[in-house]
Image (cartoon, rainbow, N blue to C red):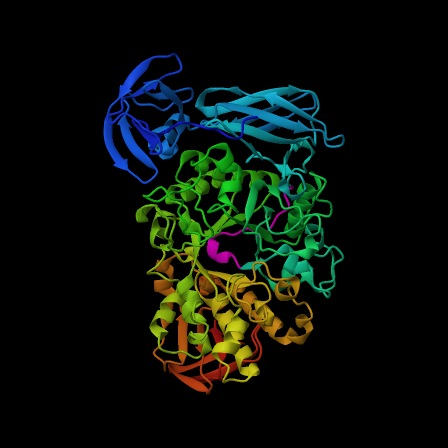
Amino acid sequence: METEVHREFEAYLDECTIITILLPSNREWDQHPCFTLIDPNGTRQSLPILHQEKHETFIKYQCQVQNLLVNMIGFHVGVGDILTDLQIGSVVRTAEFDDYYAYSGGDLGPSYSSTKTTFKLWAPTASEVCIKLIHPVHKNEMMVQMDCLSRGIWITEVEGDFDTFLYSYEVCVNRIWREAVDPYAKSVSINGTHGVVVDINKFNKPSETSTQVLIQPTDAIIYETHVRDFTVHPESGVTFKGKYKGFTQPTMGTGLSYLAELGITHVELLPLNDFEGVDEECPQKSYNWGYNPLHYFAPEGSYSTNPNDPYNRIQELQDMIEGIHQKGLSVIIDVVYNHVYIKEESSFEKIVPGYYFRYDLNGFPSNGTGVGNDLASERKMVRKFIVDCVLYWIETFNVDGFRFDLMGIMDVKTMNDIRHAVQQVKDHIFLLGEGWELNTPLPVPQKATIRNSIKMPGIAHFNDMFRDRIKGSTFNLYDRGFCLGNSHHVEEVKSLVAGSRSMFQSPGQSINYVEAHDNHTFWDKAIKSNSFEEEAMIRKRQKLATCMVILSQGVPFLHSGQEFYRTKKGIGNSYKSPDDINQLDWSLLNKWRKDIDYLKEIIAIRKYHGAFRLSSHDLIKKHMNFLDTVPELIAFELKEVAHLGEWGHILVIFNNGPDEQQVILKKKNSWTVLADHLQASTKGLYTLVTKKVVIKPISLLILGKK
């Protein structure tokens, strides 16, 4: 097939009425050239010149097309007696192109049966498409020509049983052939070099195993981890280290059993779709978080026990999620619809060049993600791809939620379309993402950012203000937040503890956290910023911060190991650091068992009483009241809440200072202590009859009365 093209000049359709022509300046042309457009039937029309620019190596002309030109395959442009093919340019990024070629069918990719397989591909700018099929054992190849239908759909039907055959598409655009893996491939070969035909009837059907049903988003307690981190440590108690199979392997107090006992409701897993950065043949030799997406429908092979088997990775992932469900926990998966690993090598760019990515006003790829490309979620077939993919993961793997990486790159309509789509197929799907404001060429009102959260009801956002005011700035290692001893922003901290009303339409949109896989762990930051303190005091500060996450209004989010002072040895960005940096150190369980048990009870208190999980700002305003205190204290009451749990009146006090403090109440009362600086219990620890409440240094106090 032709891979190299020589043209005397070049012509591109950049808009439906604009053709850009480049005449090389290394040869003589007419001083006033006349350009002609020739359609596939030989009909000619003149192309008036609208604008011209002289450059060092070429002269650029912009010419007017008389009629709207969308279906451009087979057109030529002439200057004098010299012809060139009309190439597809930036017209692919126009609204007219999007409307003309938008396809709504749900049958892209292979549709398998034992007697025939039908392949469908969306490739509207291609002049030819073939499919290459490779026998899984003998490796002999066959090439099949595909036929073009309307809306840019290419189709072919091959007779016979093609189960486990490898396949790829050969796509010709602008007379250049490129080989691409099917973006809709449900499984791939080892290291993702080819798609693989699989029989979806062989997949396990998701069971109806019941998990904890959330009445409202604020009932959730999310725990983020990574398949490999969670299982690879020598003391993890599992045999299949770094594998789907190891995640749910029965253990004695570690792993999944530990999570179920901790009291969280949702396990959030870093990307599970096929990604670059780990050699699936020798996965132990390299590490990656998974934010280098290659294939969005196919599970990652390095986590499977046999990445050469296209069914194995699917089956083991289904089994893992089912095993988590059997423990009563829900599963959120991390998805990366903001960029691809390498734009030029992606299937998107090979199949429809220029369409799937955003470009700036100068025609260069935008880079709001910081990794060289931004997916253009606002385009119809990109949006369709994302929605199709999300639904597939629900229907095939029975996931319960999605965490959208760099969600601020995506657009509001796509996020709302996802929300509407998932609500049709499964109740209580949890959607959350990083609503950061990023420099991508999408109008600000369209960005899926925190500032536009009111336009996306039912979608939660990571609350970076909560993180930075409680812990300290993520981007300044020495900046200290409230829990690290800084009392200068107490009023802001109070508003964050009360559900961040100024930021979000409802507290359920606020993901409260102080630590995640990104950036330094709390411990690694704290031992730098508070190096003047002893480690025992820093541990108290981290425990206090975790308690504030759990007891604030909104949705608590914990990073795995946060509860036992996880360290990554000072590495702030460990996305490809080795296992000894990223692994969850299970040996710390026994070392810090007392602190873990304390936090387990704090979680139980949150779940035990609905006053900690109020669903609206109006309810928070009605029931939550802050007391006037010294800056080192944050104290609030939850009043008239007997209808939400055992206690009708609750008092919570956080002390970030190194000294004992006291709060003088309006009158003397009998209180049950639910948590002090040493213990916590939903049943109560002891009774205080007092007007003067004393709180120990760097600690928490929870009082309740009926």
Q: Position of residue 252 (x, y in %)?
A: 74, 63
Magenta-drawn stretch contains 209: yes
Nearer the observer, 31 or 135: 31
Q: Residue at x 45, y 27 (%)?
A: 125
Horizontal arrangement in the rendering, residue 496 relative to residue 252 (left or right): left
Q: Is residue 657 visible?
A: yes
| Quadrant including the N terminus | top right
- Up/down of 66 relative to 572, above or below: above
Q: Position of residue 706 (x, y in %)?
A: 48, 71
Nearer the observer, 593 or 315: 315
Q: Is residue 673 visible?
A: no
Nearer the observer, 79 or 553: 79
Q: Quadrant of residue 523?
A: bottom right
Magenta residues span: 207-221
Q: Residue at x 62, y 72 (%)?
A: 597
Horizontal arrangement in the rendering, residue 308 relative to residue 54 (left or right): right
Q: Residue at x 34, y 51 (%)?
A: 452
